Image: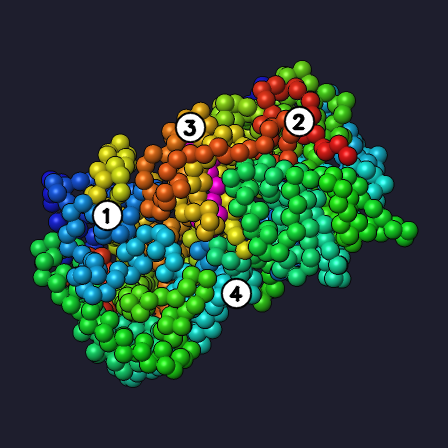
Amino acid sequence: MPPADYLDWLRREGRIVIVGASLAGLRGAETLRAEGFAGELTMIGDEPYEPYDRPPLSKGVLLGKAEPHHTGLPHRREIDAKWRLGVAATGLDIEARRVRLADGDEIEYDRLLITTGVRARPWPKEEEARLDGVFTLRTRDDAAALLRRLKAGPRRVFVIGAGFTGSEIASACREHGIAVTVAERAGAPLVGALGGVIGAVAADMHRENGVDLRTGVMVTALEGDTAGRVRAVHLSDESVIEADVVVVGLGAVRNTDWLAGSGLGAGPRGIACDAGCRAFDFRGIVTDDIFVAGDVARSPHALFGYQFLSLEHWGNAVAQAETAAHNMISPSAERRPHLWVPAFWSSQFGVNIKSVGVPPMGDQIMITQGSLAERRFVGVYGFQGRTIAAVSFDNTRWLEFYQRQIEKGAPFPVEFPTVDRRPEGRVPVDADFPDPALPTHGPMVTLSGYSPTDQQLVFHPARH
Amino acid sequence: MRLVVDLNRCQGYAQCAFLAPDVFAMHGEESLVYSPRAEEEQRERVARAVAACPVQAITADGLETVAGGASDAAR
Amino acid sequence: MTQTSMLRQITDFANRADPYPVYEELRKTPVLHEEDGPYLISGYHDIEALLHDPRISSDAANLAAPGADELSGPEATGLPPSFIRLDPPEHDRLRRIANSSFGPPHRPRRIENMRGQLEEIVTELIDGLGDAREFDLVDQVAYPFPVTAICRVLGVPREDEPRFRAWVDPIVAGLDPDTRTAGDSEKAAQEARLQLGMYLNGLVEQRAREPRDDMLSDLVHSHGPDGAMTTMEVLSTAVLLLIAGHETTVNLITNGMLTLLRHPGVLARLRDDPELSVRIVEELLRYEPPVQLLPQRTCITDIEVHGVTIPKGSRIWLVLGAGNRDPHRFTDPDRFDPDRQDIQHLGFGSGVHSCFGAPLARIEAQLALSQLARRLDNPRLVEDPPPYRQNAVLRGPRHLNIAVDGIR
């Protein structure tokens, strides 16, 4: 069949399978239907739920403003899919174009979209991780279980890792008046994502809100009682802190295990794909029937020297899924590159934190508006004379200006005056990111080099 | 009804929190928290919030909007 | 058509009823600069970008050559500039304090809880039309409604309206950038602003002694993390809210009714479905925005827009009314269509200075238009176009005479 005829056939009566029934999977499915795909669509998800939204789980849900099982995502349109929920994909046969499921079923496809995302990195010592009172927070079931425990009035919650999730959990605990200790291996919260200058502001926020923040320490052991409940946390500085709830906020693991041996270029850092979201196989050759989107994808980005980026970002999942879905059913001339500028938000201690670009790529930062001390500011990150990223604390209405600066590679330092430039913001300072060889908890953006087949692990969990 | 706010878009104008205060609330000056499943009796108020959002960031079941329009296509 | 005539055409009263052909011409030159006049920005995306650009100032002190300016410095008027004419951080501080008695997070329900009262006010005004067969919408409904509303919100006695109207009119006239009358109107505006401030000071002193449930009391007694406003700051904020609280909404309601009378199909739908007013008001804010342009911005450094360098200290006009009809942004922009899916208008501005009272204006316009649609029996325009107010910035009909077969 000539390619154009094949595409017509595919759009009319082909079979598309989406593995991963979360945000990216749903938006991908909607885009396929919106763009005229009339064939058979199957959605496979390992959780027994229709697609739901995760960011509220560590924010509105823990604050009591939303129910953990009520964050289902609205549908932009009917997707008329066959749902296979509560059953994980366990294998992929690229040649036979078949996905294997945990229940033994096999599902054939003509085009495959992989949106399996990430899962919470568990506490590495399995026996300790099984103690009653030890939680991770990624799924709605996680959130429901944690919330139940928080409502029961624990004496102290211990959060391992002061990344965004860990900080949001600590913030919610303090709103409920629950004592909380946060342990962070780096010198301050959020340093992996935003560097030490901003991390210092975050540290002040923790402490002012009554968080027992301990930095520069590692958790060495979780101690249980005779009934198998966690009762204390042991730190590398020899201290022991009693806690009846422990939340492990050590970032995420990409869900690629099911692809082991499939021949796809998939590994712990994700599944490599080209700018058009087509997956690479392990030889570095791009496929044309397997597409990837969302947290599990790593794709080259034009704005950042075509390095592969892995982004655990809500907006990226949406945009990349839309692009992948469009490309899946479009002729090559009409395909689009995924050119999303990384952006994320966090809400903690009543402060709105937003970022655009890739802060960890920056080596310097300057506060171009507002002041760190007032916790209302815009910080701009520079790399090799270019503006590469920006962060705002309660100053989000200016951020789109800085996004445009990033998109056009505006010079850094920022020489022009702004309406709220303070003396402290006139000169750039070291952004103070930790040595990338020692990543911190949950950096959320990972620059993972130039090789589409490199399956080496970049994130090394702490050795305990 | 299910709803979701694209908080990358949200700039804290709080129009939704004015118009549907049982569904949307400001937490601090700029952070929005909301109930992702609103009671059916809130539909009218949610519809007002969806229409008033200056950055068209709210998606809700059965309430159509197009976010960004040409401004996104241009980027 | 020479460039010099373009600015003149915008301010020319002859074009007030329909400025949109002038705007269409204007958009052909995205950054239009006349000899010593302002830089006119008319494209949607350029306006939107500049509203979020931290190199753009709203502070008159940053103008290289301050010209006609209705709300200039303290030495001229005795009142400090209100937050609409300030930059961060002062703007943010004052606006936060004002917001703490107006909206979320501190007072999330103040405006929503007024719905019933607002509905009553508009009902009474329409009842008051009696069995007239012809009436002026502006004098009978569109003006008294928002005045009554903002008086209640602030705590200003409604019966004082004739007094403060005498000061409000010259202040609003001072906002009109018509260069021919600038000198005189500027002086009159400053004097009127001072008088209005002195009048409000009487109320403020009273609220300092006996607080009530109104914004003036809250402003006087504000003591949040941002501290208190000085008395002068309270007065300039109150002047701003009182004027902005009704001088724009009167035009939104009047432009709205005029537009509906020109689109009887939409009016008929609104009669049966009051919630259609929600989309109608958003589309009106795009199609006939009550604030046509923002003439008060300047850049604090040289900036480049569309390849044109605008030198530091230049006056910049953001022509919202032109941006709202930019065909690069909206499909078929000259069509009034409340069903359009994408109505991301510039009617309330954007960025840190976006309209403070937007929720109140929305609710007032929705209530007024839906009730007018329901209660006016066979409404017809008596003259089209109606007579307009002089003002090119706050644009709307001075009178809107409507003939009816009766009031329901």
Residue A59: x and y, percent?
Answer: 62, 53
| Residue at the spot 39% in from the left edge and 35% down from the top edge | A427
Residue A179: x and y, percent?
Answer: 69, 57
Q: Which disc is residue B21 wearing?
A: 4
Q: Which residue is mark 1?
A: C62
Task: Give the SS element for disc 1.
Answer: helix
Looking at numbered disc 1 in the image, what kind of residue is underneath it?
Asn
Q: Which residue is mark 3?
A: A386
Q: What subunit carries mark 4?
A: B
Q: Magenta segment: does it hold A392? A: yes
**Pointer 1 with pointer 2, Cβ within 8 A:** no
Residue A99: x and y, percent?
Answer: 75, 30
Query: In the rendered image, is residue B24 in sight?
Result: yes
* Observer-nearest of A48 and A187: A187
Q: What subunit carries mark 3?
A: A
> Relative to A140, is C220 on the left or the right?
left
Q: Do marks 4 and 2 both belong to one polypeptide chain?
A: no
Looking at numbered disc 4 in the image, what kind of residue is underneath it?
Pro
The region drawn magenta spans: A386-395
Q: Using the numbered discs, state the Cα–Cα distance from disc 3 to disc 4 in whole angstroms.
A: 43 Å
Q: Which disc is residue A458 wearing?
A: 2
Q: What subunit carries mark 2?
A: A
Screen quadrant of the C terminus of chain A: top right
Screen quadrant of the N terminus of chain A: top right
